[in-house]
């Protein structure tokens, strides 16, 4: 039997857990200039946030789908960056919540998010080919609308929502919508868009390398330079940087050589 929740009380308890883990900001990328949210930042790490919400879900296995979505609604309206991303992490961890989340509801949540940290937490790894495929007409309509939205955060979402589906599936519906979204946004030069264009093209290359390569060649002068550079590197080497991966053994070998040279210098000095 499904359990009914006091949403305000549950939200307050989760916020108390977040505040208990908060710490002073000491530098690095996980600050408000990265998230671009303009809201309070508690500096609670993503792994800690995942642990909080997974613990909550483990304790609330019988909660109704409607209450899961109601809690997500509440978290996405929270005061802090961590509350809003916790809503997305709850969807990421709960298959039931993802299945219950309609494209219209996702659109409403996106209206509560600012900056790539918040947008990407909801869009990059929550909804995959299973979710988009199950309600394709509505998801397609949403992504097309997002690509033309006046809100740059929603335009970024149009691209990022397709990253996981195109990387995980060879379904040409995802690929074709990806090309359409890139085509619509390729002239923008804000980093929120240029990096997302690059990310989506690289994801699409997992199953459609030939088509992505041909598209890059045909539109190189119109696309953001970073997207052209990183996608070509990905097609050539499998990595956006174009540099080969360094294995643990390579690092150990390099460190051993450095240590050996240091020992030789020390012996010569004495």
Image (cartoon, grey):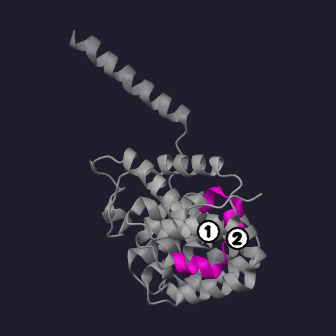
According to the image, label 2 marks what residue? 100
Q: Position of residue 119 (x, y in %)?
A: 49, 70
Residue occupying the point 42% across, 74% down: 192
**Element marked by disc 1:** helix
Membership of 101 in magenta stretch = yes
Determine the main secondary structure of the stretch shown in magenta.
Answer: helix
According to the image, label 1 marks what residue? 69
Q: Residues within 10 Å of mark 1 (few under 14, many from 20)?
A: many
Q: List the single residue furthest toward the top.
A: 270
Q: Are marks 2 and 1 in contact (CB under 8 Å)?
A: yes
Residue 23 to residue 77: above or below: above
Q: Is residue 111 left or right of residue 142?
A: left
- Mark 2–mark 1 Cα distance, whole angstroms, equals 8 Å
For residue 167, what is the image quadrant?
bottom right
Membership of 78 in magenta stretch = no
Q: Position of residue 252 (x, y in %)?
A: 49, 29
Residue occupying the point 69% across, 65% down: 65
Q: Is residue 252 left or right of residue 163?
A: left
Residue 247 to residue 101: above or below: above
The boundaries of the magenta stretch are 91-109
**Element marked by disc 2:** helix
Q: Residues within 10 Å of mark 2 (few under 14, many from 20)?
A: some
Residue 205 visible within the image: no
Nearer the observer, 19 or 232: 19
Q: Position of residue 25 (x, y in %)?
A: 28, 50
Q: Position of residue 161 (x, y in %)?
A: 60, 73
């Amino acid at each position: 039997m499904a359990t009914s929740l006091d949403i305000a009380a549950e939200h307050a308890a989760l916020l108390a857990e977040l505040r208990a883990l908060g710490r002073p900001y000491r530098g690095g990328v996980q600050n408000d200039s990265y998230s671009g949210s303009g809201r309070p930042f508690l500096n609670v790490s993503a792994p800690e946030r995942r642990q909080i919400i997974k613990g909550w879900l483990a304790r609330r296995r019988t909660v109704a789908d409607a209450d899961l979505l109601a809690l997500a609604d509440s978290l996405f309206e929270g005061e802090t960056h961590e509350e809003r991303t916790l809503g997305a992490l709850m969807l990421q961890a709960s298959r039931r919540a993802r299945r219950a989340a309609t494209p219209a509801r996702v659109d409403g949540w996106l209206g509560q998010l600012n900056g790539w940290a918040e947008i990407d937490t909801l869009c990059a790894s929550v909804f995959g080919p299973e979710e988009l495929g199950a309600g394709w007409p509505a998801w397609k309509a949403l992504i097309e609308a997002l690509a033309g939205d006046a809100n740059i955060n929603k335009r970024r979402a149009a691209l990022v929502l397709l990253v996981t589906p195109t990387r995980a599936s060879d379904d040409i519906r995802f690929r074709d919508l990806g090309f359409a979204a890139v085509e619509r946004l390729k002239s923008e030069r804000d980093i929120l868009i240029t990096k997302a264009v690059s990310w989506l093209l690289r994801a699409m290359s997992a199953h459609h390398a030939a088509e992505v390569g041909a598209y890059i060649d045909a539109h190189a002068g119109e696309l953001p330079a970073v997207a052209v550079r990183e996608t070509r590197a990905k097609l050539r080497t499998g990595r956006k940087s174009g540099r080969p991966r360094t294995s643990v053994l390579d690092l150990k070998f390099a460190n051993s050589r450095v240590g050996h040279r240091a020992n030789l210098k020390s012996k010569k000095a004495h």
